[in-house]
Amino acid sequence: MRDIRIIHQFEESNKTFIIAESVKKYCKCPSCGIVSDKIHSKYTRKMFNGSLDGSPQEIILIARKFKCKEIFCNQEIFTERFDFIDPYGRLPNNIIEIIKILGLSTSAEKVSKIMSKLGIKISHDTVLRTLRKLPKGLIKLMNPLLILE
Ligand SMILES: [Zn+2]
């Protein structure tokens, strides 16, 4: 993840906490597309909470909000965007892709169990929510028994 760097790592209650911050110098406004380097504020977001290597880990990302520089843009402030995670996502996109691939071949319940074995706790409702973002035709073709309602 080239846009972030780890600034702190510590253990507490047998869990490793990794604190990372953004190193991006600017960000594109999602409304008007104008690039801004005017930082408005910082905030933290959980990026991952699981145990990919067997020991519990939580990655906390210090992200920023930017001020849009375009005076005619109706978006005054916007959250920083990253390639590897959605603006309000709780899991990196590569893990979301695994969930989608599994969801196209088995039930949401089983995807939830498989992900749990991999150390990622995700409810079957979240699996269904993730799959609903895929084209309906693709789901029908790949997993006709899957019920998304
Ligand atoms: Zn803008």
Image (cartoon, grey):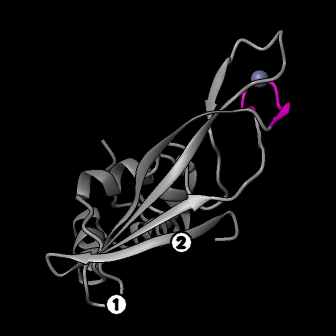
* Quadrant in the rendering for residue 84: bottom right
Q: Which residues are magenta?
A: 29-36
* Quadrant in the rendering for residue 69: top right
33 falls in the magenta region: yes
Location of ligand 1 given as a quarter of the image: top right
Residue at image location 25% in from the left, 51% down from the top: 125
122 and 18: which one is in front?
18
Q: Main secondary structure of the magenta part?
A: loop
49 and 95: which one is in front?
49
Looking at the rendered structure, which numbered label has been put on residue 53? 1
Does 6 appear above or below 66?
A: below
How far across and down, in percent of the image, does residue 70 sit? Answer: 84, 18
Amino acid marked by disc 2:
Ile
Residue at image location 73% in from the left, 54% down from the top: 24
How far across and down, in percent of the image, does residue 49 sit? Answer: 31, 66
How far across and down, in percent of the image, does residue 141 sit? Answer: 53, 62
Does 134 appear above or below 31?
A: below
User: What secondary structure is found at the residue carrying circle 2?
Assistant: strand
- Residue placed under numbered mark 2 in the picture: 6
Which residue sits furthest left? Answer: 13
Which residue sits furthest bottom? Answer: 53
149 falls in the magenta region: no
